[in-house]
Amino acid sequence: MSTTERNVVLHVDDVHKNYGGLHALSDIDLEIEEGKTHAIIGPNGAGKSTLLNVIVGRIPPSKGAVVFDGQVLTGKKPHEINQLGVARVFQTPEIFPELSVLQNVMVPAFAKRDGAFKVHMMRLLDSEAGIREEAEHLLADVGLHERRDTHAGALSRGDKRRMELAMCLIQHPRLLLLDEPTAGMSRHDTNTTIELLKKIKARGMTKIIIEHDMHVVFSLADRISVLAGGRVIVEGLPDEVRGNPKVQEAYLGGAH
Amino acid sequence: MGNLVSKLSLSRRDLLLLLAFGAAVLLMPLWLSPFGAAYPDLLQKFVIYAIFAVGFNLLFGLTGYLSFGHAAFLGAGSYAAVWSFKLLSMDALPALIFAVAISGIFALVIGYLSLRRSGIYFSILTLAFAQMSYNLAYSVLTPITNGETGLQLALDDPRVLDRALGPQPEGLPVPHLLGLELTGYTGFFFCALVLILAFYITVKIFSSPFGLMLRAIKSNQNRMGYMGFDTKPYALTVFVISGMFAGLAGALLAITDPLAGAERMQWTASGEVVLMTILGGVGTLVGPALGAVVIKYFENIFSAFNDQILSNAFAFVPEGLRETVVAIVGKFVGEGWHLTLGLIFVLVVVFLPGGIMEGIRRIMSLFRRAQRPAKGAPARIQPAE
């Protein structure tokens, strides 16, 4: 695809976020192309998670706007943003610990099918065969099918993350945000997750991924933005970013 | 059986539970008689408060929102039912419909305001609204509530529907269902059938997608937002349903004894339903009803024990010692029944956080383990429910 026919699905337009005198984000401009995986990297405290929180509506920006597919996300509530097709995997797994693994994956499917609010009181959960089948299928994809009846709270951290991924995928989001999807995982689990994310990519889903692990970033990213001190210091293709002296400097001068 | 399953649209397991529950409720006059509790007045209280607790548990057990003001809806239901008797008819049906509608609207208003907050702030708001209702019933709203005397039937009540249908008998009329007087055991069986219907609705909600959404709200409300749910209307819907159950219970109190007083709205009454639910088992289907029976049993039976009954019971103890035993045990019965209840509550919360139902589940699993000796590593996977 040549750069002239780029199909940009998410614009981050001149976003600033200040906490008192602290500039957590300044002059952030991003354009995310449809179907691509865009990685955001940078040293600790660079503002990566803040940026993700601004996109999903958890934190309002001090200035600027986020536009997804022609719709301004800024000022919308988290559930409204999700209903537009934006799903998110959290840095620490955000799940329903008291529900079974299967139920965890079924719940978001109802939001996708029925919208933000619909009462099905006289219908049986067991008769929701479509949603159940899809949830079981996704659990098989992430390797948790055998544990579908376990309490989600009893899963290991890595399993929780994979389950959370299935919870996002069942919504068929147009944009998936992943906040350090492999943090705290063993090398083996990390590789499994990379393979899984590659499989999703083949389905044409747009992804923004925040990651510390450079192995993960360079395995998956089509494009990389480097954040430092709340600003984008470098943006480009993985090969361009890899050798950039500014990036080296940011990491060496940072917390590491 | 299969036919019934599809007609009631229940899973096989839930249908069996409903049938067992229904049988247990209808047979209460039999199995409660060894406990000295098988008289209609008390049995009615058991089933009415069971409705109250089952409805309260829909809100607290499923969503985790702890309302400390649910008695307000019970009281509103009672007042609405008595007004229906006074103005419309002594028939129970209009009274029930009227009471459920009024308490539903009342719950909609209070729920809308209280659900703007969660956790302890929600509880405090509901408590504040209920106490406000209680105080208003004694003061400003006296024309509607008849203040301290309580709202009662009078000979010259309009009862438009009844009078339109024909001349009225002498004396104060009795609530009836299509001509069947709802006193004594008839009253009990009527309340029992309403409880079974309420339980059926509860089972349906528990096993529906709506029930799953409510449990997910309890588990992680934030996450619900990020996956596209607007959680407020879900919580408000179940709050209103729960308020309607309370109104239903209030109406039945008025049907079995046609008067309504403000003390039904007091915070102690709101606290009592919390105790019933926790004692029986929060979030379980049968637990709250069981808790209601246990608490009402203690309130009515234990409080009636006096020293005379005790010394008869301890007749086997030698003379000199008997007075001491009676004096000690006497502290736990009669007016001291709250002490016994408090001790039981503390024991249950400390040793059985899941209430009586958890105790039953533990005993059942003990039996199951005894039947099937463990083979190999017991990698027990907890089933989700």
Image: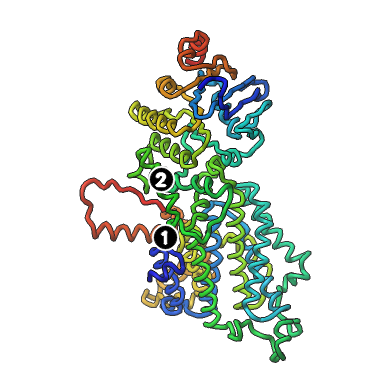
Q: Is residue B183 above or below residue B72?
A: below
Whole-percent x, y for residue A35 in the image: 50, 29
Determine which residue is flagged by label 2. Answer: A101
Specify the subunit that label 2 lies on.
Answer: A
A159 shown above or below B254: above
Q: Identify the chain of the residue marked 1, using the numbered disc in the image.
A: B
| Near-viewer residue (A85 or B26) | A85
Q: Is residue B279 visible?
A: yes
Compare residues A96 and B278 and report the one nearer the observer: A96
At horizontal 61% and vertical 49% (from top left) the residue drawn is B232
Q: Residue at left 51%, top 70%? A: B197
- Say which element carries label 2: helix
Residue B347 seen: no
**Residue annotated with mark 1:** B357
From the viewer's side, name the closer residue of B111 and A31: A31
Of tags 1 and 2, the one toward the viewer is 2
Residue at 50% from the left image edge and 8% from the top image edge: A245
**Pointer 1 with pointer 2, Cβ within 8 A:** no
Name the amino acid type tagged 2: Val
Spot occupied by residue B126 in the image (x, y as percentages of width and height): 64, 55
Q: Are marks 1 and 2 on the same chain?
A: no
Residue type at tag 1: Met
- Number of numbered discs on residues: 2
